[in-house]
Image (tube, rainbow, N blue to C red):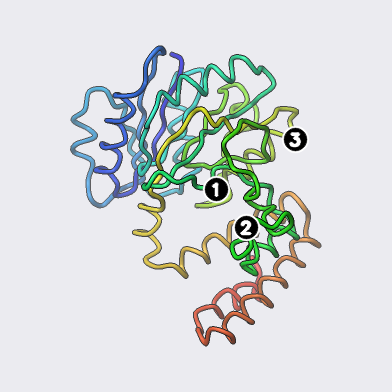
Amino acid sequence: MDVSFIYVNWNSQGEIMQSVRTVREQTRGLSYEIVVVDNDSAQGVDELAADPGIVLVRNTANAGFGAGCNLGVRHSTGRYLFFFNPDTRMVCNAAAILCAYLDAHPRAGAAGPKILESDGSIHYGGARSFHSLFNEFLEHSALAFRFPRNPIAGRPYYSTWDHDSTREVDAIHGAAMVFRRDVFERLGGFDERYFLYCEEVDLCKRTWNAGYSVHYVHTASIIHSGKHSSNQYFDGFHPLILQHVKSLAIFMRTHYGPVRAAIWRAMIVILYGLKALRNRDPRYLDYCRWGLRGV
């Protein structure tokens, strides 16, 4: 088997069926299978279960995205693993392009496509720099979003680059990423301490640390509408961002140690305390309370 498409489902059966339809329409020139891990969805999986072309794996609890992906890998056979979000759509033969690219670059451990918004514009989160104290300041202060074309402020998402060329990058977006199976297994898969967010950046960093590279391949493209399952689960912007911050805490401590993690946590308290005052929004204080309590 050339490639295994792996989805993690949580109340997104309809989205996955639409995504699978585009995979079947666009994927040519290689053998593939489709594996869906259901993280104990309350809405049911009857349509997924009825499709003979889908390997459905039922989880007894919602263990998170990374844990779901790891379970899907254990039920797959492809030499390449294509992790594909429910709210993604194929618009070209992206799997064949990415697999051919990895075939031609044996030291590349993973590759990701250009990610498009629903209106066809480029989503600049398709590739990003690693989280660091400075990059975290740029993001949480919103400077990275207010001044995306500035060569310093634009560092977290490479936003001074037009994303219309192929290059090595620190990390690719978890919504659509292809890994060599042997590299993924050597690394032990996704770190299951991350319930949601940052798990793909962590995996990409470990890929680089193991001596492999990560590539953004602009000739492959997909559409990603974004956050379908997470919006349901977290029920609002602030709970979603708080989950992101909790995952970042794991990343910072794992890769930079307790001292830098403590500095990062203090920075979160200060920046979101200032946002609470400026915006007169007490919900920002939730981040401050969490930062003061620690992980």
Residue in view at x 75 percent, y 35 percent = 209
Of 152 and 110, the residue lying toward us = 152
Tell me where residue 49 sits by quadrant. Answer: top left
Q: Which residue is mark 3?
A: 209
Foreground disc of the pair 2, 1? 2
Identify which amino acid the numbered label 1 is placed on.
Tyr
Q: Which residue is mark 1?
A: 124
Marks 1 and 2: in contact by CB < 8 Å?
Answer: yes
Relative horizontal placement of residue 12, taking residue 114 as reference (left or right): left
Relative horizontal placement of residue 152, taking residue 237 as reference (left or right): right
* Secondary structure type for disc 2: loop
The residues bearing labels 2 and 1 have C-alpha atoms spaced at a distance of 10 Å
Of 175 and 291, the residue lying toward us = 175
Residue in view at x 36 percent, y 52 percent = 229
Look at the picture and state if 210 lies above or below 175.
above
Look at the picture and state if 148 lies above or below 166.
below
Quarter of the N terminus within the rendering? top left
Residue 170, labelled with which disc? none
Position of residue 164 measured from the top left corner of the image (x, y, whole percent): 57, 36
Identify which amino acid the numbered label 2 is placed on.
Pro
